Image (cartoon, rainbow, N blue to C red):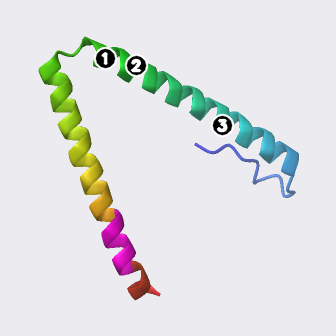
Amino acid sequence: TCALPISSGTFEQAKVAAIAAQESQTHMQLEIEHAKMASQIYQLLSSDQKAKVADIIAQHQQRMQERMQNKEQTAPEQQ
């Protein structure tokens, strides 16, 4: 959630920057903890489970690449 001060009637860039910096720092810490937890869980997996994770990641990356290609092909039509 964004806690930017919009109801004060004046724009205070320093206050907005401070809030944005704090939110950015919090988001970064959450991402670090998420990556750490995922790494710890991955270490508990068997070789077969790790192979399955690799397959799932490869399928996900393939779908994302296809979506990006579809988006690039439809973007000029939308202009």
Q: Position of residue 51 (x, y in %)?
A: 17, 28
Residue at numbered disc 3: 23
Depth check, front residue: 48 or 36? 48
The residue that mark 1 highlights is: 41
Residue type, numbered disc 1 = Ile
Q: CA distance from mark 1 to mark 3?
A: 27 Å
Q: Quadrant of residue 67?
A: bottom left
**63 left or right, relative to 20:** left
The residues tagged by marks 2 and 1 sit, at their Cα atoms, a distance apart of 6 Å
Residue at point 29% right, 49% down?
A: 61
Residue under the image location 12 percent in, 22 percent down: 48
State the CA–CA distance, disc 2 to disc 3.
21 Å
**Callout 2 touching callout 1 (CB < 8 Å):** yes
Q: Residue at x 24, y 44 (%)?
A: 58
Q: Amino acid at mark 2?
A: Met
Q: Nearer the viewer, residue 24 or 69?
A: 69
Is 35 situated left or right of 47 in this image? right
Classify residue 47 by image quadrant. top left
Q: What are the residue bounds of the magenta stretch?
A: 68-74
In the image, 56 versus 34, the foreground residue is 56
